[in-house]
Amino acid sequence: MIRALTGFATRSPWKVIALWAVLGIAMTVLGQAFLFRVTQPSTGEFLPSTYDSAAALKVAEEHFGAKPDANPLTVLVARADGAKLSDADERRIDDEAAKLARREVAMPKPKDAPPFTQDHSQVPRVSPAMTAPDRSFRLLAVELTGNPMDPGMQDLYRAFRDQARAGFAEAGLRTGFTAGLADTVDTADGEKTRSTVVGMAMLVVIVLLHILVFRSLLAALLPLLVVSVIGGAAVGAVVGASLLTGIQLDASTPQLINVVLIGIGIDYFLFLLFRFREQLRSRPEQTGRAAAAEVAGRVGTAVTSAALTIVAAFSTLGVASFGQFRVLGPAIAVSVLVMLLGSLTLMPALLAVTGRKMFWPSRGLRREPSEGAAGRMGRRVAKRPVAMVLASLALLGALAAGLAGMRMDYGTGGGGDAHTAAARTAAEIARALPAGVSDPTTVFVTAADGGPVDPRALGGLSKALAAVDGVGQVAPPVPSEDGKAARIDLFLTADPHAQQARDLVSGLVRDTVTAHRPDGTEAHVGGTAALFADISAAVSGDLKLVFPVAAGLIALILILLLRSLLAPLVLMVSVGLGFAATLGASALVSQNLLDRPGVNFMLPLVLFLFVVALGTDYNILISDRIREEMEKPGPARAAVARAVRHTAPAIATAGLVLAASFGSLAVNPNPGTQEIGFATALGIVLSAFVLSIVLVPALAALLGRSVWWPVRPRRADDRADDRADGRTVGHDGRGGHAGPAEHEERSLPVG
């Protein structure tokens, strides 16, 4: 199957290229046009209904008209001269608020907007909320409906903000906007320049690294172009599947898909390029098309194995209880399969078309390169495998020691940029009112029999909640229009996004509600703090299920593809050590160097999926080459040395590119994003340079051809040489002196 695909691609390259060009453009347009129609902005919608905050959200939707894509905003209105508000000022503010509530806000339509762009024009919901005790400002509650990640929706908010500012300015009043869309838009605007600069810097680094390695501009730029085409098709496929099935995606899914595809796509193209260059050097008489066919068929097996392990890892998220995981896993799995198809068709087709021109103007194909650092490392690993194993274990063990004191921070990763206008407005509000006033915790009360609820009967509950330490203020109960529910808003003294608020809501607040709710009623606690408290519980349970299931599936795939029991065990143990070392190092940095309360609760899962799944790519590549070299005559350790010599440059280059891509996230002002960027970059570096280039080859050198037990790649005439492995080590890294096989190895070209 694999060779059939690669064979067709190299026999009819122009047909394949034309098909992918049309497919890539069409699917990219589809993905961009409908992306924000298939994403779900409300995280609470992904929680199982058994969780308290999910039940609260259902009550809010059924009885209070709340919508999953509603974006609550808080608008601060104060006198422009800084004086206290008078009664006349309050009436003027409320009159202007009433005008805003009747006026439609038209969504601006930029000229470069993609086709089928959704029009979010709407009449906002605006109502007065409260006046500060010192009468320094009055707050308005505003609600806009739409996906907050949709650029059109963000433009609509900007239009509303400008409209509101102008209206209040005419009355001599100033305004400030915070929470929801205000935070999202202000952060995006503040990060626009930084993101552009970092993105361009990473692009330049990747291109320069490719130029340094291949001495060719085409070999540097083509992988990026190809990955963009295939990536666009993959996102389009995921969006199309979502449209057909009606399953909503999480808002972060498209971004994660892009990160994964860029990483594995460039990796796979690099694997092909290095092997293609090696083939052209060793067979100068061979045509570029024939070399591409041979290389693609050989490397295609390793690439398929690597891609299937990633698919298996992400597919296991389908068993999670948290809906965000259940949607994310299959979505990324589908996109990886599309990238695999492109790796087996489009990439070989481009190699067949370009041939030796791929590496122009480099003259590296005309001469035999020097041994290089990869060759020296291969000989060192083969000569001293025990020392290399011990050194690797010592490094990984030292980093993994950080797990001993690791704590989880179930924060939302908030914090962001404290210098945005939204952050300054929130700080101004917090100086006069409880920190949670712009994002209240809400208690929803319904009758157990579905009958009406009397808000006057909730006085005891309100009084008990007001006595809870950490609750700054309790609003009067508000009945729903149908009279079958009531809500009580709590304004916490802690930031709703902070751990303190989540502990309070999931502990004392819920206990108080359970103890003091009127007989015959049901009560549920909702809001940001409650939502993320429940998400933390759901994620903790899912991690205990996802990790073993994913590890079992990856091990099964490795057994089937490597046709061995011992080799998959070696790979799984090494990857497990790399995961533990990365997580431990992240804990040390976050808790000790940066003095944070703990590592972000999403980090273990992110590391497992990105570091374990993507890092396994490198292990599969080196293992596949070791097996290939061991099928040749000669000692096993010489085969390991050759495998490292030829494969290490590809792994090192791919690892640096992927680590640089993830590392760019570390400059993000969001602490959670910083943590993920640092940890994934470190994990990729460890996977590439410690596990794949040192530890796995060293273990293979120690075990010899037995690593492939029970189906070992050996020949009858190799047995005598195998028995020589492990005797007194000479300068050839095995026993005795270098023989013909060793001289043959040293004559092979590098990378």
Image (cartoon, grey):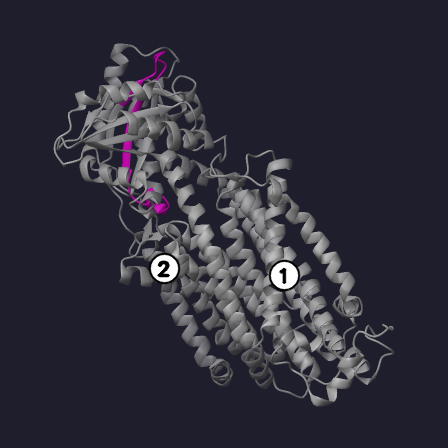
Tell me the amino acid under the disc marked 2: Gly
Camera-nearest residue between 618 and 241: 618
Report the residue marked by disc 2. Answer: 31
Mark before the other along the chain sequence, 1 or 2: 2
Residue 581 picture location, percent across and down: 63, 51
Q: Is residue 685 left or right of residue 14?
A: right
Residue 206 occupies quadrant:
bottom right
Image position of 649 with respect to 82: above or below: below
Q: Nearer the viewer, mark 1 or mark 2?
A: 1
Q: Over which residues does the magenta segment extend?
A: 129-153
Report the residue marked by disc 1. Answer: 574
What residue is rendered at 28% in x and 56% in y?
A: 116
Image position of 41 with respect to 10: above or below: above
Residue 63 picture location, percent across and down: 18, 36
Camera-nearest residue between 517 and 278: 517
Tell me the amino acid under the disc marked 1: Ser
Residue 585 picture location, percent across and down: 63, 46
Residue 318 occupies quadrant:
bottom left
**How many residues crowd mark 2 within 10 Å: few (<14), some (14–19), many (20+)?**
many
What residue is rendered at 20% in x and 28% in y?
A: 519
**How many residues crowd mark 1 within 10 Å: few (<14), some (14–19), many (20+)?**
many
The magenta stretch spans residue 378: no
Residue 484 picture location, percent across and down: 15, 33
| CA separation in Å, label 1 and label 2 | 38 Å
Residue 329 in view? yes
- For label 1, the SS is helix
Image position of 383 with respect to 467: above or below: below
What residue is rendered at 22% in x and 22% in y?
A: 458
Q: Quadrant of the C terminus?
A: bottom right
